[in-house]
Image (cartoon, grey):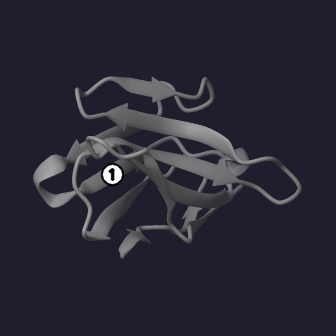
Amino acid sequence: QVRLAESGGGLVQAGGSLRLSCVALGSILNIRNMGWYRQAPGKQRELVAAMDNAGNTNYAESARGRFTISRDNAKNTAYLQMSSLKPEDTAIYLCNVLNARPGYPPSNYWGQGTQVTVSS
């Protein structure tokens, strides 16, 4: 059983910073990608940032230059450092993990999300 545990969300004023954490718990090996998505009310879920196990990163245009994703592979943990936050960053932020166990189809896991609210 695999579970993603997110933390670090909260309420912050515009211009402030938050750091999100996501740890993959349970029997999970061979993590390929770890990433963060977000979903605001009435909007589609969108990629914020992702990193593969080689350290390659992919950022949404809106996040580039303000957000930084990092990973601690030994701890199966991903972080999202968010700076210069804007009210439009308000959303539920969800952790995503793609596990690629050799000989098996890839498995995609989602966390329950952590709320980030940025006040103006």
Q: Residues within 10 Å of mark 1 (few under 14, many from 20)?
A: many
Residue 54 in the image: above or below residue 11: above
What element does badge 1 sit on?
Answer: strand
Which residue shows up at 45% across the image and 43% down it? 83
The percent coordinates of residue 4 (x first, y second) are: 40, 68
Picture quadrant of residue 18: bottom left
Q: Amino acid at mark 1?
A: Tyr
Residue corresponding to mark 1: 79
Residue found at the far front of this picture: 103
Residue 2 in the image: above or below residue 93: below
Picture quadrant of residue 114: bottom right
The percent coordinates of residue 5 (x first, y second) are: 39, 72
Closest to the observer, 21 or 101 = 101
Q: Is residue 98 left or right of residue 85?
A: left
The percent coordinates of residue 33 (x first, y second) are: 37, 40
- Image quadrant occupied by the N terminus: bottom left
Residue found at the far left of this picture: 74
Closest to the observer, 55 or 14 = 55
Q: Is residue 72 left or right of residue 100?
A: left
The percent coordinates of residue 90 (x first, y second) are: 68, 56
Which residue shows up at 26% across the image and 57% down it? 77
Which residue shows up at 50% across the image and 66% down it? 111
